[in-house]
Amino acid sequence: GLGSLIEFWGNLLLRQFVDHLLSRPSPWDGHHTRLIIDEAQLVAPVLSDVAEVILTTGRSRGISLVTMTQTIALLSRESPALVRCLEANVPHKIVGRIAASDAELLSRELTNSPGIDETRAKVREHFVSKITNLLDRHFVSLVPGKTTTFEGVQLDLNAWDEAAVRQTQALEAAARRFAVPDGAPPRARLQDLAPRADTRRHGQSSAAQHRGPPRSRWG
């Protein structure tokens, strides 16, 4: 029920951040500022207006932009202009299992190489079918000019539990080894171990000597 509030505050704060950063002197002599926006579709209304300014004018003011989203289709639905702006101005990297809707958007960027007689529709069809029909634990990484398919590693979760048990046993053994046994004599106090001052050499009377134990030199 807070989706509308999240979008409102996200867009408001982003607008204020960008306006403040762009008001700095140019060239900026201070720290470089990198805007990292996760779930970019939530702030797409404002980001579509300021993304091009950040990626062009913002460079002279030490501003850079990183946007992240789980689906390009959702970002494109919120702002098609934003997707085109990001694709034209910044390198994009896609990692994971790609949905069919995202694959269709990506396939539109593909063009035929010189000398290939396949139609663009055929190339797009091959691309979509290749990256949407991956086997279990198979993923794809797309960077400009390169496509890599990789496989996830099967983890032995039982090994983590066994290691936790062994570590617990080792800690318990160390505690039993160094623990003080029951019935041990109490620890000696500092005032008991400190040397007592000899008051007789200061000319004090015997009555003064028996008033009580003198304080240690450590107080």
Image (cartoon, rainbow, N blue to C red):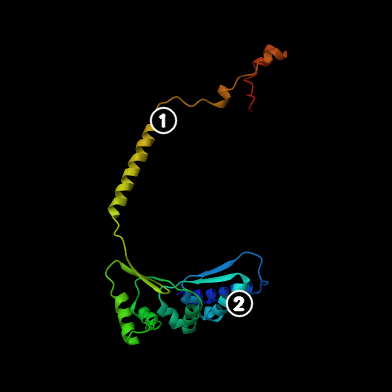
Residue at image point 44% right, 79% down = 75
**Which of label 1 and label 2 is nearer to you?**
2
* Residue 59 located left or right of residue 105: right
Residue at image point 54% right, 26% down = 189
Residue 153 location, quadrant: bottom left
Give neighbour class at mark 2: few <14, some 14-19, many 20+ (Cα, 10 Å): few
| Amino acid of disc 1 | Val
| Amino acid of disc 2 | Thr
Across and down, in percent, residue 40 comes to 48, 74
Across and down, in percent, residue 159 comes to 29, 51
Q: What residue occupies the far front of the structure in this picture? A: 115
* Residue 40 located left or right of residue 205: left
**Between residues 100 and 214, which one lies in front from this camera angle?**
100
Tell me if I can see residue 177 in this picture: yes
Across and down, in percent, residue 129 comes to 29, 79
In the drawing, what numbered circle is on residue 34? none
Mark 2 — residue? Answer: 57
Q: Quadrant of the C terminus?
A: top right
In the drawing, what numbered circle is on residue 180? 1
Residue at image point 59% right, 73% down = 59
